Image (cartoon, coloured by chain):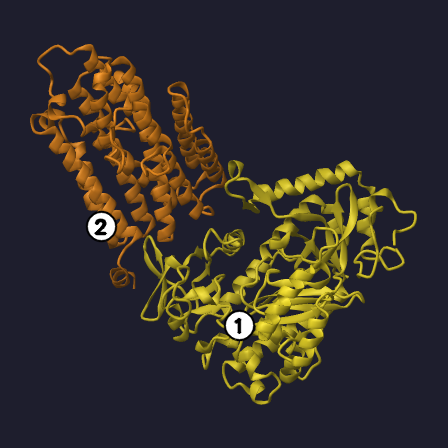
Amino acid sequence: MLARVATSLYWMSRYLERAEHTVRLLEVNLNLMLDEGEDTNGRRWTRVLNALGNPKGLEWEGDAYGLARALMFDEHHAASIMCCISSARENARQVREQISSDQWQRLNRLYHEVTQQERDLAQDVQLSDFLLAAMEGVHLFQGVTDSTMGHGEGWHFIQLGRYLERASATVRLLNVYPVEFWQHADRAPESTDYLEWIGLLRSCTAFEAYCRVYTADVSPDRILEFLLLDAKFPHAIRYSVDALQTALEAIHREGGGSRRGETLKRIGGRLQAQLSFADVQEIAMHDVVEYLRAISSQLQLVNVEIFHQYFDYPIVAALATSS
Amino acid sequence: MVLPGVPPALKNYQLDGAFDEMFTPHGEARAHYAPLLETFMQLPAEELQRRKLAAEVSFLNQGITFTVYGEEEGTERIFPYDLLPRIVTNAEWELIERGLTQRITALNLFLRDIYNEGKILADAVVPREIVFSCRHFRRQMRGLQVPRNVYIAVVGTDLIRMPSGEFVVLEDNLRVPSGVSYMLTNRRVMKRIFPQLFQQYGVRPIEHYSQALLGTLRSLAPEGRPEPTIVLLTPGVYNSAYFEHTYLARQMGIELVEGRDLVTHDNVVYMRTTTGLRRVDVIYRRVDDDFIDPLAFRTDSVLGVAGLFNAYRAGNVTLANAFGTGVADDKALYAYVPQIIKYYLGEEAVLKNVETFLLTDPVQRQHVLENMDKLVVKAVGESGGYGMLIGPHSSKAQQDEFAEMIKADPRNYIAQPTIALSRAPCLVGDGIEPRHVDLRPYILFGDKVTIVPGGLTRVALRRGSLVVNSSQGGGSKDTWVLNQ
């Protein structure tokens, strides 16, 4: 497969995953905002911006709906949902002959649904309608991708982009909470604490899945265990890293298992092992924030290494190994 | 003249000076069109519309569309398409085939000659000035040996039919001719929409074009590369022929690459794959000379591959077509093609040229300037119907504008009489009306010459229009070459 094609598939997938994540963050926080006083708005939305990696040019200025709208529609901000979807489409367009026509049509329709929305929507109802439509569009695209595209090398690059983006986003989301947040409070939790905890779970579509494992008995250490270390829940970091590693191995195999993929397999494997054998008590005893930061930088390393291995390798090095 | 006692579907069918493909001047259907006409007369109007719709849906589903951006849901439009096939008899085709083979062989010898010994120039059969002043002449090609001495591997030649019914050559396309995907998909759709009629007619197949193209490209591989890697180089998704590039790449089972996918190292071309670099041996390029290598040609090109020309010079990669072939389809040089054929092959041209006035000649120029309202003026290096003045259909202001341009740069223009292209029946509304058509057969030239029987018949869909180019509101129809 051409390196350019693989790059486009990878980015198409990452952008869509990013759009979905942003949708969910906005939906949850617009909702939570209603239950809490306006005095917590500043903290909440600063945290949302942190969780999105502090997009350039966006700051909390006291207007929650204004910020939400900017994160949805503003084509000048690369982090906005609209920009993510249009970047995904732009990448898909470069490889139109490599994806199925169903995939293309689905993504194209999503793009037009998003761009044709009224920019100055009234405050509440329509905003959440929009978010719902965007989420639905992304989900449909994923379904169409799985059922109409051959599960070969290209499909694995799509998986790679999706799970790397998902793992990175979830780590970043967990990382916006201070160390104290994760410690089991001595005081009895207040109702606002519950709201926050459930909000965090819902930001990862994890609330129902969490309840199945732990019942509705919500506590921060369990949330951490679930979102970080669960092996079965698709938005958990460990699950995402497992999926990432599966994709990497498949791509390595498809390429004839050359020596060039070894570094990447090692880095991915190390991260996978670390999460597989971790214990949440141990992590909590030390510095949770520091631990998450380490995971995050390892994910970044994987991304860099993917580029070096598959997308943008130096010619001389490739010449030495290819002949 | 309107036909007497005609069925209502034909009430708008006008016959005049132009050659009509279906009717004789006396209004009788030609033998090879009679069964088609009969079938269409028997079909109720609704059935015709139903089949027309079926054809359109079929195009849409195959993705043979161009996308109009900025409109609702990425509106995909199908390429304008006419349901009635254009029919060419076997005898007519044999003549065309013989003429094209002769013409391409001679033009290829001409290219070899001017980039090497230059005998034809020394013998003053073709004036040096015309060759060396051509914008598409590439001095970089001087003295370069190309595989099998083939410069023009893929050619599309535009033929028109004179009022007498004679086929003549209007234009050679020796650089990157396009449209062959429409020829192939038109046929697929026609077979689905009119299976019985198709079978009854005994139409010669064209489906082997892709294999023939692949075979041609393979035969041109550099020596010592028995299993060559062949790629199709496209300018990218923004090119209007991108659909065709993806179509051909898929049909041939070769990789579709852009300039940024290729790198050169030690005069060898590689493509970047996820598993490393893979050597490329033959490039079917759909990128113009100017843009293909920023080191050798236009330095501001981002579509090309730096160092590609040197790899080509070193003989490590073949390009089809070669560089600098545009000198032989320059419209001023066109006037000399009959002499070129005579010079290299010692034969008279089977397919004639259209009479052409060279504006560098003071006498001919004067004649043209005095008759701007009757002639067609064309810029020599343009294609696709751009840079053209059709005298009878133009305003005085446009004529004056072209006259000024001719005086400023006479080498850049030629003039030809306005020819009423032949007309073929087309489905217009509920009825059948004649529209002007041309014919572009595709010629492949590798270890042998292959011309698939047929080609792209382009139609000027507007009544009375003489411009068939797709960029100027033209459409296309299937072309049937008959067995008998």
Q: Colour of chain B?
A: yellow
Residue drawn where x is 44% and y is 64% of the image: B291
Q: Find the residue positioned furthest to the right.
A: B5
Q: Residues within 10 Å of mark 1 (few under 14, many from 20)?
A: many
Q: Nearer the viewer, mark 2 or mark 1?
A: 1
Q: Colour of chain A?
A: orange
Badge 2 element: helix
Residue drawn where x is 34% and y is 34% of the image: A80
Rendering coords of residue B242 (x, y %): 51, 53
Q: Find the residue positioned furthest to the bottom.
A: B123
Which image quarter: residue A137?
A: top left
Q: How many marks?
A: 2
Q: Is B212 on the left or on the right of B317, as rendered?
A: right
Q: Chain of mark 1?
A: B
Q: In the rendered image, which residue does mark 2 sit on? A: A262
Rendering coords of residue A313 (x, y %): 27, 55
- Judging depth in this view, the residue of B187 and A64 nearest the camera is A64
Q: Is A185 on the left or on the right of B302, as rendered?
A: left
Q: In the rendered image, which residue does mark 1 sit on? A: B325
Residue drawn where x is 38% and y is 25% of the image: A131
Type of amino acid at the residue the image marks with label 1: Thr
